[in-house]
Amino acid sequence: MNQYNIHNIKINPADFQHPMDKNATRLIQSSAAFRKCLEFISKQSLEKQMQCIYRSSLAQLTPKTAPGICRMAEEACEMFGAETVPELFLQRSYTTAVTMMGIEKPLILLSTELLKDIKEEMLWGLIAAEISGIRNGFGEIRFAEWLCDSAGIIPAVISRPLSKLFKEWHKYLQFSHDRAALIAIGDFNKTMCAVLAGEIPMEILMRMDFSDPNCSYMKQSREFLENKGHWTETLRDIKAFSNEGVFYAARYVNLYQFMKNEYWDITEDFMEEI
Amino acid sequence: MEYGRLKGIKTEEYEYPGEETAFSLVKKVPLLDKIVAAYLKYGNWMLALPEVQGDCFRVTEETSPEAYRIYKTALTRLDMPSEYPLFAKEDYEYNAYTTGGSAPYIVIHSSMLKNLSEEELLFTLGHELGHIKSGHLIYYMMAQGFGQFIVNLPIPGIDKAAAALHYALIHWVRMQEYTADRAGALAAGSIEAGQVVLGRLLGAENDLLDGVHFTREDFLEQNATFEELNQNVVGKMISAVLIMNQKHPWVVNRIQALEKWKNSGSYQALLDKYVSSLC
């Protein structure tokens, strides 16, 4: 991959959205409860309330306070065709997280811990991944999910049926995000480092070569995922069912397969051989 | 700014103007003096001390000489009549609070002791001492739990009275924060240090990725954009509903309030009055 330059990518994120994520997203968007939830959000001016909370209580990243990060957001919007550049906010938190939500005016929350030792190109990938979700309608789903989790805001008759759909969606959404990060970063190893930033210390990540199919993490991941007929398979599946997200092992193998099979076709038009 | 004791400084001299107005509303609540007396005698505040003593470590000259020295400076500058126990609690979040009813003590989170500069710590500790100096504590603690307690009493109509008391108290408690911020600035000898601490509460740190840098002007600008949201009726209503149950004002508003106090000249006038009297 390193003998290519990728430039001026302009892609509709729907073109590489993971099929399972696509199905889960459609299921949510077509459900009556979700439509009711959006109506409720609009009627109660809930998006404005969210903006009010964030502007009053979290530090806003602006071209003046964080020029590099704001530029990343603008470039990612261009890359994935998002019309509105999201507002960026910083949240003091010991978890490494980046989250996008919102309907008319999406916003992205970045945790302080994430910005402590992540490399710029990895952060670029994570921000781009979040922004890729804007066109796929993830902003409104995330916002509805956030509201449903905040007890009492959305009536239970709407929030209960939705919560199960959100949980399923969450599992597959990450596959699409990882793909978007890979397209933005253009380097598989760095993308995996970005995906695992916060889970594995940066100094260990920097020693890994995730693009090598024989690397120890690939062996570990395959062993875990192909562990058929063994009692650990049952335990794994139970855990997968109860988890909010997917196992990192699954994300890694999934992204590797995407890189091997589809990535080149999708990015071909934007490749320039060196 | 370096100085010693602001000898004889009174809370009325730096009290936030809205606090007195809010207190006049609270004072109209019938039987409040009796409620306060009962709360002081039997309130649940007594339950908190064993927890703090059991889970936090006391900041003393022996356990943390630097933090203790800074605490002593804050006590001296604000001319506090005595020393109150200071405890540190292991926590990532930035927070400090004062509790303890008629025997107050302060708890500060370890993240603040670790990351804040001397001036910023003086502001934080001065803010807490400001609550003690102004006698805010009892009403604050009542606002925390009294509304729920009274609402469960089997007396007809008590829920409406409790709601009125609750909102009056909580509004006053928010005004108290502005006064405590002023005390913090006096203890620090710097308005800017206070604004930086409040900025840290927003998440604004300057040791993050290269290129990320915040100044107090950025917080003031953010306050202006926040106020833009509240220009129309819907915005005003949303803001009012969201703040109604909060015990602290919006952080950006607190930063702006300190700026306003500085620009009014009152802060400097106080320092001129007390600091020059030392010389």
Image (cartoon, coloured by chain):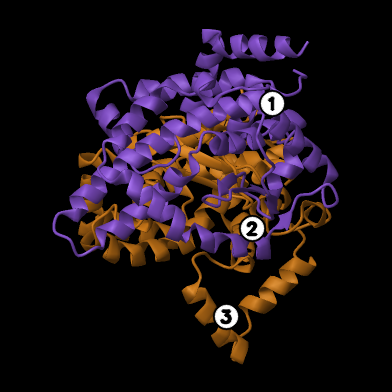
Chain colours: A orange, B purple
Q: Earlier in the sequence, mark 3 or mark 2?
A: 3
Q: Name the residue type under label 2.
A: Lys
Above or below A181: residue B182: above
Q: CA distance from mark 1 to mark 2?
A: 60 Å
Chain assignment, label 2: A
Mark 1 or 2: in front is: 1
Residue tagged by mark 3?
A: A236
Report if residue B178 is visible in the image. Answer: yes
> Helix or strand or loop: what does disc 1 sit on?
helix
Q: Which mark is residue B188?
A: 1
Mark closer to the observer (3, 2): 3
Q: Nearer the viewer, residue B244 or A184?
A: B244
- Determine contact: label 1, label 2, CB under 8 Å: no
Label 3 sits on a secondary structure element that is helix
Seen in the image, is A250 located left or right of residue A220?
A: left
Rendered residue at 68%/21% (across/down):
B6
Position of residue A233 relative to residue B38, above or below, is below
Indicate the amino acid at tag 3.
Arg
Q: Which mark is residue A260?
A: 2
Instruction: Please identify the quadrant where the C terminus of chain A is shown.
Output: top right
Closer to us: B279 or B259: B279
Under tag 2, what secondary structure? helix
Image quarter for residue A261?
bottom right
Q: CA distance from mark 3 to mark 1?
A: 55 Å
Given contact means CB atoms under 8 Å apart, are the residues at marks 3 and 1 in contact? no
Query: Crowdedness of circle 3 by 10 Å Cα count: few (<14), some, many (20+)?
Result: some
Residue at 32% x, 57% y is: B148
Residue A192 position within the rendered picture, expressed as x and y whole percent measured from the top left: 68, 54
